[in-house]
Amino acid sequence: MKSGINEFPSADGLWTGIRLATDANVEGAIVVAQGTIRWVGARSALPAEFTGLKPHDGGGALVTPGLIDCHTHLVYGGQRANEFAMRLAGATYEEVAKAGGGIVSSVRATREADEAALFAQAASRLEQLLADGVCAIEIKSGYGLSLEHERKQLRVARRLGEAYGVTVRTTFLGAHALPPEYAGRSGEYIDLVCDEMLPALAAEGLVDAVDVFCERIAFSLAETEQVFKAAQALGLPVKLHAEQLSDMGGAALAARYGALSCDHIEHLSAEGIEAMRSAGTVAVLLPGAYYTLRDTHLPPIDALRAAGVPMAVSTDHNPGTSPALSLLLMVNMACTLFRLTVPEALDGVTVHAARALGLQDTHGAIAPGMPANFVLWNVREAAELAYWFGQQPVRAVVRQGRIAIGGNA
Ligand code: DI6
Ligand code: FE
């Protein structure tokens, strides 16, 4: 591990020998100055003023914006392979949760781990995501479920961003599950989340957005709204784990609060889609969870597409339902399982993922004025990024203006 992004070589200069995924048949050029995109386009149109800059040769690579993993639960203690085995033997996710496994078992392991141990475990997972071209990532809390332990998770998330020079958006998910000490006292726990945990963590600068798991096995619509009101009072944007296992009407509620995104949404209704469309809320598709749970109820992709709701794709990395550490594999699954087109799936891990995090002005595209975040891939055409799976076609990664991978480019 590098101890800081500044140890990576600067990406400043003129990048040629590349093909931009938007126009892969012609040679492209990118000018980076002080870590920011200065110019991008066909090499034949490069203004003369840039020709003398420090050269970087891409060796014919295809270039896309840096990938964005917009929904992860990356920081937690332990792992839950035992539950995987239980589910293979026939137990459902809900049955495992009711048997004392599920989220609460990760809560136990997360509370037991100190900050250094949590950092080390999450860092090795982050390194794998970064190796796949990820340049920005959302990390949720939700395995601490007390002020002290949620703080520990969020602090680790922030420190990961600093240590790896990767944009991290933190999301407070205190309302992920009911901690065992509040069994039967859901209302009291939500009061604690709203009145103590969220205000304290927000004041410490640890919260970029607020999320709730709105589900039969988690929190009700009314409890979700209470959390949204607390977020709104603090000026924090909201997002929602909505309609994953059943239609709770969560998406429409979230849209009323101007949610950045509604995530999972396998059971999303027509009303939910319309509410998201009119609010500009992003639909975050999580094929890794769908796959792991061997779900068969597809999200309403055709209706989302017809309504023009932007669709993002993410790993939902978590120890229970999506132990996935490759965003490119999710691109593949979004195409094979959810039948997204290749351009839709690639937009889903770039431009729409940026919007799901409120980062659309700085991430998800290669555009003048944006920080330089882009990936050079050893592929001929963009469709290969969805087609191969289990392969790592990264040639080089420019992250926050530094050559984080492939530093000899
Ligand atoms: N939905 C999910 O798929 C994850 N959390 C959530 O709200 C599962 C988290 C876990 O099982 O640990
Ligand atoms: Fe999730």
Image (cartoon, rainbow, N blue to C red):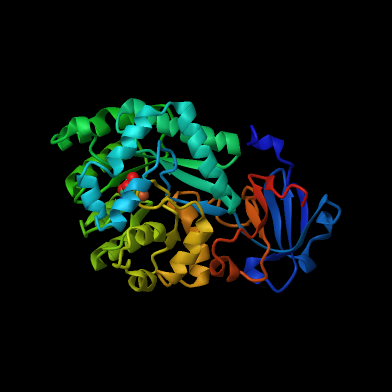
Picture quadrant where residue 302 is located: bottom left
Image point (53%, 36%), residue name: 160
> How many numbered markers are drawn?
0
Task: Establish if 262 lies above or below 127.
Answer: below
Say which residue appears at 64% left-offset and 71% top-offset. 381
Say if 78 sits above or below 70 in the image. above
- Looking at the image, residue 79 sits to the left or right of residue 132; the answer is left
In this view, the residue in front, 192 or 394, is 394
For the question of whether residue 95 can be seen, the reply is: yes
Q: Position of residue 299 (x, y in %)?
A: 32, 66
For the point 41% across and 44% down, which residue is it? Answer: 73
Q: Residue furthest right?
A: 52
Task: Quarter of the image for the N terminus: give it.
Answer: top right
Q: Residue furthest left?
A: 184
Residue 219 in view (yes/no)? no
Q: Position of residue 354 (x, y in %)?
A: 49, 53
The residue sitting at 35% across, 29% down in the picture is: 111
Quadrant housing residue 177: top left
Q: Nearer the viewer, residue 393 or 160?
A: 393
For this view, does 359 lie left or right of residue 190?
right
Q: Position of residue 159 (x, y in %)?
A: 52, 32
